Amino acid sequence: MEIADIRVAGKAALAAAMQDARDYTVRLLDTLAGDMVTASPTPLDVPLIPIINPPLWEIGHVAWFTEYWCLRHQGEGMAPAPSLLADADRWYDSRTVSHDSRWQLDLPDWAGTRRYLLDTLDAALATLESRPNSDESLYFHRLALFHEDMHDEAFAYTHQTLTWPRDDGLANLPPGRDISLAGGEFQLGSERGRGFVFDNEKWAHPCRLDAFAIAATPVNNGQFLDFISDGGYRDPRWWSPTGREWLAATGRTAPRYWRQEDGQWQQRRFDRWLAIAPAQPVIHISAFEADAWCRWAGRRLPSEAEWEYAATHASDFTWGTQVWEWTASDFLPYPGFAADPYKEYAAPFFHSHRSVRGGSFATRPRMRHPRYRNYYEAHRDDIFVGFRSCAI
């Protein structure tokens, strides 16, 4: 299936994708449960830190979300139908269950959580089979699929944060060069009648761009190492005021998960320290570091509109398979924005987050779309994020 097909795919393909996603989540649960026998501390005993969730809670939340939107949701202002688990809303509703409280809940055990995963999918697939084959009718099943794919990637962030083993997915980039684009007026955002659309992509609207030149690939480790070697972290000229505050608060002198050992730079990739690979994309970079590198290099970050234009107009624009990419744009609503029924998806994060585009090696291929808008706070560097640059 092609990258964007699942947004318009019919019931059979959607059911197969939901089964694939749930199989992936169940395998993750089974792996963690197996690790509990040999690991100390166990995967259940994760520290309370802001950038991760307790895995047992997060996996249960994935099942709850599918059940809530595919089976229980009965319309705006109406009470949801009962859950398969009496306390599911008290445990798993992220809208009401605060982050820090998730470590204190009387959650079902591993076996109970696994049953909930399997039972909610079976029920959702049965409901899907009886629905008309229309975009409106399939909306919540597609939403549940993409939500699960997002959390499956978030589990990879947890593996990296907690030094758990996992396969890596980075590879060398081709030699860097710029792509010159004519710009002009184009439609930014997703158009009506094109299948599933996240609410923050609504709706396509005219956007005019001047001609610009954008790198065909993200910045690599070797290019970023030149910035470090030139004293980039010590030179305030390259850092914005908020970037300087971030530097002072973190004491950072290199990207997160980098270190020097016997004069050689290394990078931690999950549970292993590896020599820096110069041609691989730089990863775990905050927006502040991306901004600083661009100033040092005499370049700039692309705007969100420039990134989308390049992704939809340049065949040699390489994106979506290795690292997410910071843009220069604040995460803002498009003109006429109205939240979809899952109101908490994007609206609470407008004006406080930075737009991020593309996808990473941990992103499921069906999630990748040139108009998909991801978003993070500028200081986040635990995610699989890098950046590319534009000529000034």
Image: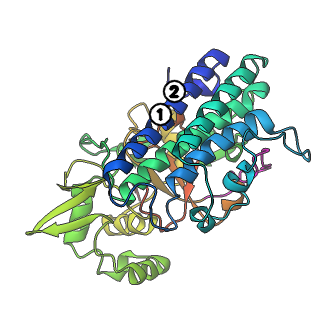
| Residue 385 at least partly seen | no
Tell me the residue that label 2 is attached to.
Answer: 20
Instruction: Judge the density around disc 1: few (<14), some (14-19), many (≥20) Cα neighbours within 10 Å.
Output: some
Q: Looking at the image, which residue is at 47% across and 41% down?
A: 29
Q: Nearer the viewer, residue 213 or 125?
A: 125
- Residue 343 on the magenta segment: yes
Which amino acid, mark 1?
A: Tyr
Tell me the residue that label 1 is attached to.
Answer: 24
Q: Describe residue 307's horizontal placement relative to residue 235 as left or right.
A: right
- Quadrant where the C terminus lies? bottom left
Asked which secondary structure carries label 2, the reply is helix
Main SS of the magenta part reads: loop
Figure check: 45 above or below 334: below
Which amino acid, mark 2?
A: Asp
| Residue 238 at least partly seen | yes
Q: Where in the figure is residue 378, as x and y percent of width and height? A: 50, 66
Figure check: 171 above or below 12: below
The chosen color scheme is: rainbow
Residue at the left extreme? 262
Residues in magenta? 331-345
Q: Describe residue 79's horizontal placement relative to residue 376 as left or right.
A: right
